[in-house]
Image (cartoon, rainbow, N blue to C red):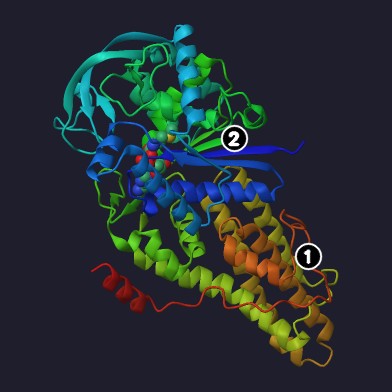
């Protein structure tokens, strides 16, 4: 049986406007999913929407719609953005899907029957936009520590999950499985900020929130956000339904990719729920950093995401989804925070995509056209020191890319791919094919040089395709490569000699940075 790879994004709040910042998680997961498909794995890439809670009711009311009408529109909008960004998810779960609601009820009842959920009463400071209860000491200047807004003191009858029983088990988990929570710095955060001070039981139901899944055995309570949201990763696979074949096939997840502010839920609450249910734990949880804009997080609550120049719906039609995707992979060191600036984006577009990758492809294709009528030349054994050196760099960077992708480091991986393109450009300068073409007995050497270059473009484009799926596929098509999985990454013998290159448009036409800044300035006025 094929090896499987199960990767998830968080389920998104449909009431948040989607911008480049929150799209980041999904864009990163897409490269990982595509890469693993190309490794020949059976991939399940899950994303979806987190549709319950008071915030949704309030937003629907404000829009003069029912919750269902409001959510359907927001979900359609989310899906269309994922399409625009070329997101290849395999399944989209909505927490209002009836199969999910039923399974969540079952999970809640099972946890209750096993003694992990009990009835009590909740007192605390509640932030409506964040749907979070805070203790007095967590408040910052009496306000919500996440979004800085007003909080309300609330008390109500509620069910609790015995999270406090899991401290030791969680510490053991982090110790025995250092790969469970990545990057490693997040482990200290969990231990020092949450587990050492003592985990408190978690409020998992509400009587005041109507828009939620009712507790099966006590329907005046609705199941509060985390017990509804987190299990999406298993209900999407049919856990708790009649057909759990996907669950059997894909669970445990290879990785949950999430932003750093929700690590606590995924590295503490989620494994505790799974342990209580007696289920296996995900292999890895990766908490990535934030995309910052002028030093500020593009946040859900601060509403600073109205800036049009960071809206993918504006940027994609102008610069392509590939270019936006590439910028995020490359510029934000995966796991850390990183800045988005339009200028940095435009400069990278020119230096990396246009001058490096694009130029390599276009100058090689033109030389093959000029000297060999666009017919792929025969290769030969690599004996020239320049050729051997080129092959060594390609081999090293192929290995690096595979290793980094296995470690989920998309930034290092994409940098390794670029080292291949850079090396190929250096090779051209070194071997000067145009000079070789002028030599009387230069034909054989010229063939080898151009064949080497085409092979390097093939290997680089294969590795680059998960990041820039449209343009790299165009290059692979032009080279006559139809395979969906990686082949011949370790040799210069993947192309068919005698086959004609298909014509290829300029991949990333060079931009006039000042003119583009001016244009974007006009749009955002
Ligand atoms: O948190 N930079 O959903 P969400 C990087 N429903 N990532 C960002 C970001 C930024 N500026 N702003 C947001 C939720 N994100 C819950 C999850 S899972 C069971 C429930 C990321 O719509 C954020 O970190 O607020 C998260 O990974 C994703 O956008 C969706 O956030």
With respect to residue 523, does 410 lie above or below?
Answer: above
With respect to residue 293, does 478 lie above or below?
Answer: below
Residue at 41% from the left image edge and 69% from the top image edge: 346
With respect to residue 414, does 447 lie above or below?
Answer: below
In which of the image's four quarters is ligand 1 placed?
A: top left
- Mark 2 burial class by Cα count in 10 Å: few <14, some 14-19, many 20+: some
User: Are the two marked residues, 2 and 1, in contact with CB atoms closer than 8 angstroms?
Assistant: no
Residue at 57% from the left image edge and 51% from the top image edge: 88
Indicate left or right for 177 with 105 as reference. right
Measured as percent of width and height from the top left, residue 95 is found at: 44, 33
Indicate left or right for 24 with 38 as reference. left
Dividing the picture into quadrants, the one containing residue 472 is: bottom right
Q: Using the rendered image of the protein, determine whether residue 170 is visible from the camera's viewpoint.
A: no
Residue at 57% from the left image edge and 53% from the top image edge: 413
Residue on which disc 1 sits = 492
Dividing the picture into quadrants, the one containing residue 437 is: bottom right
Q: Which of 418 and 112 is in front in this view?
A: 112
Q: Using the rendered image of the protein, determine whether residue 242 is visible from the camera's viewpoint.
A: yes
The secondary element bearing badge 2 is classed as loop
Q: Which of 250 and 496 is in front in this view?
A: 250
Indicate left or right for 490 with 409 as reference. right
Q: Does label 2 or label 1 sit earlier along the sequence?
A: 2
Residue at 52% from the left image edge and 31% from the top image edge: 233
Residue on which disc 2 sits = 254
- The C terminus is located in which quarter? bottom left
Measured as percent of width and height from the top left, residue 20 is found at: 39, 54
Q: Which of 168 and 27 is in front in this view?
A: 27
Measured as percent of width and height from the top left, residue 416 is found at: 59, 57
CA gap, disc 2 and disc 1: 32 Å
Q: Which of 390 and 40 is in front in this view?
A: 40
The secondary element bearing badge 1 is classed as loop
């Amino acid at each position: 049986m094929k090896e499987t790879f199960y990767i998830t994004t968080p389920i998104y709040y449909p009431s948040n406007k989607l911008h480049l910042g929150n799209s980041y998680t999904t864009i990163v997961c897409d490269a990982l999913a595509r890469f693993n498909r190309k490794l020949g794995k059976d991939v399940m890439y899950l994303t979806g929407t987190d549709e319950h809670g008071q915030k949704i009711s309030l937003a629907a009311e404000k829009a003069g719609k029912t919750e269902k009408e409001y959510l359907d529109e927001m979900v359609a909008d989310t899906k269309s953005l994922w399409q625009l960004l070329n997101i290849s998810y395999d399944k989209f779960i909505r927490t209002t899907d009836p199969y999910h609601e039923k399974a969540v009820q079952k999970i809640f009842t099972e946890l209750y029957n096993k003694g992990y959920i009990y009835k009590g009463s909740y007192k605390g400071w509640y932030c409506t936009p964040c749907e979070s209860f805070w203790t007095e000491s967590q408040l910052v200047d009496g306000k919500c520590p996440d979004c800085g807004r007003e909080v309300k003191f609330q008390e109500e009858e509620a069910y609790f999950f015995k999270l406090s029983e899991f401290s030791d088990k969680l510490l053991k988990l982090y110790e025995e499985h250092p790969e469970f929570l990545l990057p490693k710095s997040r482990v200290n955060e969990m231990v020092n900020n949450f587990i050492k001070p003592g985990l408190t039981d978690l409020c998992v139901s509400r009587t005041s929130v109507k828009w939620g899944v009712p507790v099966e055995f006590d329907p005046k309570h609705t199941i509060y956000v985390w017990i509804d949201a987190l299990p999406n990763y298993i209900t999407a696979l049919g856990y708790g339904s009649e057909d759990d074949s996907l669950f059997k096939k894909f669970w445990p997840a290879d990785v949950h990719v999430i932003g750093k502010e929700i690590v606590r839920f995924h590295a503490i609450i989620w494994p505790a729920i799974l342990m209580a249910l007696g289920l296996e734990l995900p292999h890895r949880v990766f908490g990535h950093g934030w995309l910052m804009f002028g030093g500020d997080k593009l946040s859900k609550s601060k509403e600073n995401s109205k800036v049009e120049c960071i809206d993918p719906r504006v940027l994609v039609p102008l610069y392509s989804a590939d270019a936006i995707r590439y910028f995020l992979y490359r510029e934000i060191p995966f796991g850390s925070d990183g800045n988005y600036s339009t200028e940095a984006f435009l400069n990278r577009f020119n230096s990396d995509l246009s001058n490096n990758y694009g130029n390599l492809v276009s100058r090689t294709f033109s030389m093959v056209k000029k000297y060999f009528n666009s017919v792929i030349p025969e290769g030969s054994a690599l004996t020239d020191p320049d050729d051997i050196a080129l092959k060594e760099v390609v081999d090293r960077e192929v290995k690096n890319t595979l290793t980094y992708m296995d470690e989920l480091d998309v930034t290092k991986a994409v940098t390794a791919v670029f080292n291949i393109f850079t090396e190929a450009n250096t090779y051209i300068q070194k071997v000067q094919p145009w000079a070789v073409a002028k030599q009387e007995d230069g034909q054989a050497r010229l063939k080898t040089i151009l064949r080497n270059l085409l092979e390097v473009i093939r290997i680089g484009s294969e590795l680059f395709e998960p990041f820039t799926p449209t343009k790299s596929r165009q290059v692979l098509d032009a080279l006559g490569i139809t395979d969906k999985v990686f082949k011949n990454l370790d040799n210069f013998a993947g192309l068919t000699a005698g086959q004609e290159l298909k014509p290829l448009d300029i991949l990333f036409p060079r931009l006039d940075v000042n003119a583009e800044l001016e244009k974007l300035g006009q749009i955002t006025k």
